[in-house]
Amino acid sequence: MAVITLLDGGLGQELVKRSGDRPTSLWSTQVMVDHPGIVQQLHADYFAAGAGVATTNTYCVHHDRLEGTELTGRFHDLHDAALTEALGARPAGKRVAGSIGPLVASYRPETHPPHDEAVAKYAEVARILGSKVDFIICETVASLAHARAILEGAKAGGVPVWLSVTVDDEDGSKLRSGEPVAKVCAVAIAGGAEAVLANCSAPEAMPAALAALKASGLPYGAYANGFTQITKDFLKDKPTVDALHPREDLTPEAYARHVMAWVDQGATIVGGCCETGPAHISELARQLTAAGHSLN
């Protein structure tokens, strides 16, 4: 039996649901501003469900995401708020991971800035997060160029870095860019990543992604989303999450069956992404421990 790192589940969709507010292009960032304490409560709920890691609500806190909105100029205090809410929920012995999401947009590798520009922007975030978190997780990385830049920038945080890629929902052996997931392994090793994962893709795509990531020799795993598909409306500039629709079949029990199969493949880091919540993590914790695995 294995020692499994159980991550938390999704933040953005769950926060929008809990707030009852209409989604905006600022997604979970807007909810954090409008409802202080709601993020900390969600982190606490994930810890209570069995998660060993809280992922900070900083995925969308980039200058380019904030530009032209009412939160322009609040880059630093939004990071501070997200860190305060995560650290405030952390029980003794648990960890906090600092999330760095993509610049400009998710799932759109063609919008990623040139290398040197991207490195500088990722490094700015990493320096803020690195002073407070246990490690940094680079999330929803959609291309090899994105992976190279974010790993280089994340080094500025001075803490361990994990790399997590997003893959084609129909062919998990390919990144959203169309490049082979297998090529991420060399990039991850060269960039100093301490773990490699796949996230924010259909659970059915993860076995192929994991088969490719295993070749890195690093700890590996996955955390999938529960969207029916990534729609064309969501691939426009500054989209809102109501352009995406949740699957009705991905109950906590159904999701856990996917995850247990990943663990059987050798995955030792698992959790949930968008459209998963504390009930999914609780069921994962139950099934993992029932199978004889230990959680950290």
Image (tube, rainbow, N blue to C red):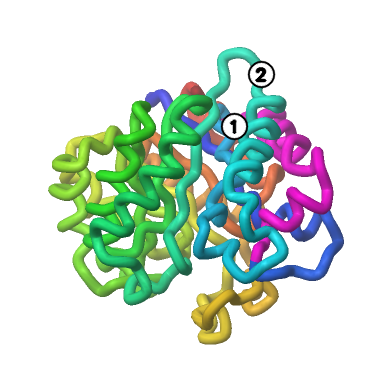
Provide residue 221's location: percent of width, then percent of height. 37, 43
* Marks 1/2: CA–CA distance: 11 Å
User: Which secondary structure, mark 1?
Assistant: loop
**Residue 131 in sight from this viewpoint:** yes
Q: Amino acid at mark 2?
A: Pro
* Residue that lies at the very extreme toward the right in this rendered image: 20
User: Which residue is located at x 47 percent, y 68 percent?
Assistant: 105
Residue 214, image x and y in percent?
A: 22, 44
The boundaries of the magenta stretch are 26-51
Marks 1 and 2: which is nearer the front? 2
Query: Which residue is the extreme one toward the front?
Result: 73
Identify whether 236 is placed above or below 223.
below
Specify the farthest residue to the top.
Answer: 92
Tally of marks: 2
Say few, some or many: other residues with alpha carbon within 10 Å of mark 1 (under 14 / 14 to 19 / 20 or more): many
Q: Quadrant of residue 182?
A: bottom left
Tell me what residue is drawn at x 72 percent, y 64 percent.
70
Residue 178 drawn at (x, y percent): 25, 74
| Residue 2 shown in magenta | no
Q: Quadrant of residue 113?
A: bottom left
Mark 2 lies on residue: 91
Residue at x-position 35% and y-position 39%: 162
The first of marks 1 and 2 along the sequence is 1
Query: Residue 32 magenta-drawn?
Result: yes
Against 226, is 74 above or below? above
Kindly state the secondary structure of the residue where label 2 is placed: loop
Identified by mark 1, the residue type is: Ala
Q: Nearer the viewer, residue 140 or 265?
A: 140
Task: Report which residue position mark 1 lands on.
Answer: 51
Residue at the image position 86 percent from the left and 61 percent from the top: 20
Depth check: 105 or 114 in front?
Answer: 114
**In the image, 141: left or right of 70?**
left
